Amino acid sequence: MLPAPRATAPAGAAGDGSGVQPRGQWWTSPRFKTILLYVVSIAVGFGLSAVLVAVTHGSPSKVFTAMFDGSVRSWGSLGYTLDNMAPLLIVAAGTIVTVRAGFFNIGQEGQLTIGAMCAAFVALKVHPSGPLVLILALLAGTAGGAIWAGIVALLKFWRGVDVVISSLLLIFVAGQLLSYALSSPTFLQEHGSGGATLTESDQLSSKVQLPHIGQYPNFNFGTGLIIAVAVAVLLGTIATRTTWGYRLKVLGFNPVVARRIGVSAVLFGGAAIVISGACAGLAGSIMLTGQAYRITPTFSNNFGWNGLLVALVARNRPAVAVPVAFLFGALQAGGGFLETTGVPTDLVNIVEALLVLAAVFPPALMALRRYRLKRSEQAVAAAEAS
């Protein structure tokens, strides 16, 4: 007599240890929950924005239609979105390198400003202008951002100053330097400004402006986007595919282990901070030579902060940073177009901020959950050990 077959659990059933999600329960999968969280968060963001516009006697439908028109509805607006995406992607790529090393540089706004100042100085003061000067301006902007971030690294490894605090404070210093440069004829003050104490710089010559691909007003975008994608691919590859990137990861995961295997925090951590600043400086020089063509007191326009948010939303994954940068670029372009329709600037800024918060909220919530789970596991392990 043959023995009766043993009852076995179906593949993927809960508790079988296979890790395969059971069929018919895809709505309980982490990926679906993540997507659902993003959808709900963005829907709430749009809802709050609509309520705010309605309370201020505006038309929510007209506001959102204007943002859609100004960001992706036409080929022209799509090109403008890509132009806004370029500096955001570069800032995010540099931020990802720094976070991978375990440091949190939040001074991109100041580093971008210093980079744009250096690029403007070279572009306006070096004669005769031409393609070589354009390249020198981009390099000067990159070097300016790197040096400004280098101060943060120096303070960290020489005097132990926290990176977050020093990089944040240097943003205000950069703003004051920009104000001084724009009020000084020796540096960037516009010629013929009548001695105004705070003005804008001269406009860059067409010979030191980044060329555009395509024809205005149809689909066209600046070559800064090509530079941005190249920088993102390069840094992403280095950070994830090379020994240097692996050492950065070890440094960020456990500095003690990194020190024992010979990974210098000063060398690798300092390099990561400087690279982040260089990227912010390059982003500022691309904004100057590709879109603005002159530097003003409000030149940065929160691109440094938004680039930092792009890295956070992408959860420090270079490939994910590309579509996230496009989303933030669309918000930036749509907000700019909305302002031209007569909507008050403050209201535009608040609507933009609500939509950005809607995009940032899901990864922040998931990070908080992971932190609580880790603390809970550590508490259980400590209790079992005692």
Image: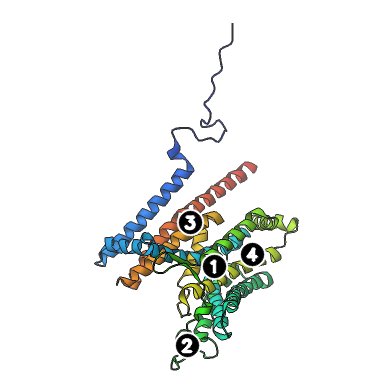
- Quadrant of the image containing the N terminus: top right
Q: Which mark is residue 139?
A: none
- Say which of marks 2 and 1 sits in front: 2
Which residue corresponds to mark 4? Answer: 272
Q: Which residue is mark 3?
A: 323
Vertical order, 161 against 51 (above or below): below
Residue at (60% x, 70% y) in the render: 278
Give amino acid for label 2.
Glu
From the viewer's perspective, tell me whether residue 219 is left or right of residue 49: right
Q: Nearer the viewer, mark 4 or mark 1?
A: 4
The residue singled out by tag 1 in the image is 106
Question: Mark 2 sits on what residue?
Answer: 190
Q: Secondary structure at mark 1?
A: loop
**Classed neighbour count for the residue bearing mark 3: other residues with Cα under 10 Å, few (<14), some (14–19), many (≥20):** some
- Using the numbered discs, state the Cα–Cα distance from disc 4 to disc 3 in whole angstroms: 23 Å
Q: Which-is-in-front pick, marks 4 and 3?
A: 3
Residue shown at 75%/55% (left/top)?
A: 261
Q: CA distance from mark 2 to mark 1?
A: 31 Å
Residue 82, position in %: x, y? Answer: 46, 63
Q: Are marks 2 and 1 in contact (CB under 8 Å)?
A: no
User: Which structural element holds mark 2?
Assistant: loop
Neighbour tally class for label 1: few under 14, some 14-19, many 20 plus, Cα within 10 Å: many
- Residue 13, image x, y percentages: 51, 30
Q: Earlier in the sequence, mark 1 or mark 3?
A: 1
Disc number lying in front (1 or 3): 3
